[in-house]
Amino acid sequence: MAGPVVFIGPMASGKSSIGRQVADLLGVPFVDTDAQIVEKLGPIPEIFASLGEAKFREIEQGVVLDALRTNTLSVVALGGGAILSEQSREALREHTVVLLMTDESTVLERANLEKRPLLRDDPSAWSRILEERLPLYREVATVEFNVATLPKDVSAAKIVAWLREEDLA
Ligand code: S3P
């Protein structure tokens, strides 16, 4: 079964941008679950403010499970907290899952914190949140790439080379 190659990892690790480049290099569709949520319901900070994080997670789980339900070779980028859902982690076991790892100083240099409600008021929460989630990321990851020091196109090319080597794309 082909199905999606799924990108997971901490906030602002490059899942959307590198994921899109990988999809382009492979010539397959790209889906970004956070972008789908924004399209349906508006900006994520506003969803957190009006409905709360628990409701956001419920919405996110629905969008993630939907996005994973395809047999078409594609690339799907998830939000950093999507792996908090046990059902989503269960669904990920059937897929090739690429964990993008980076570090706090790289993220705080590059990322748009305004659109990330969990970092906006406390950027140093990034490392604490990662520490809590790391076992969950590693539980579902097929492979892990450290992308902190690399230009995005170099990371994308490395990931495509790995997918081809493993006969996964
Ligand atoms: C979140 C990550 C965000 C977004 C939301 C919550 C998280 O996506 O889904 O702000 O809990 O890690 P990115 O991983 O693209 O920042």
Image (cartoon, rainbow, N blue to C red):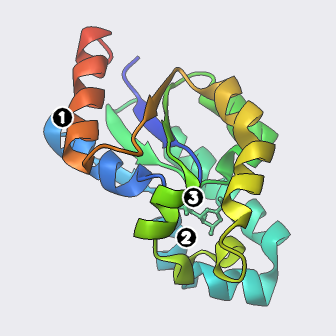
Where 27 falls versus 145 (above or below)? below
| Callout 3: CB less than 8 Å from ligand 1 | yes
Left or right of residue 125: residue 101: left
Neighbours of disc 3 within 10 Å: few (<14), some (14-19), many (20+): many
Q: Residues within 10 Å of mark 1 (few under 14, many from 20)?
A: some
- Determine whether, in the image, residue 27 is placed left or right of residue 99: left
Q: Is residue 18 left or right of residue 121?
A: left
Residue hosting label 2: 37
Residue 102 seen in the figure: yes
How far across and how far down the image is residue 144, in percent? 49, 27
Q: Earlier in the sequence, mark 2 or mark 3?
A: 3
Q: Quadrant of the N terminus?
A: top left
Q: Nearer the viewer, residue 3 or 135?
A: 135
Q: Does the beta carbon at disc 2 come under 8 Å from ligand 1?
A: yes
**Residue 26 circle label:** 1
Residue 168 is situated, as x and y percent measured from the top left of the image, at: 33, 16
**Who comes first in sequence, dot 3 or dot 1?**
3
Amino acid, disc 2: Ile
Q: Quadrant of the C terminus?
A: top left
With 38 as the anchor, is 125 left or right in this view?
right
At a point 54% along the width and 85% down the height, the residue shown is 42
Amino acid type assigned to the residue bearing label 1 in the image: Leu
Q: Which residue is mark 3?
A: 11
Q: Whole-Å distance between the Cαs marked 1 and 2?
A: 25 Å
**Residue 47, horizontal then vertical, whole percent:** 68, 82
Point 71% across, 72% down: residue: 118
The three-letter amino acid code for the residue at tag 3 is Met
Label 2 sits on a secondary structure element that is helix
Between discs 1 and 2, the one toward the N terminus: 1
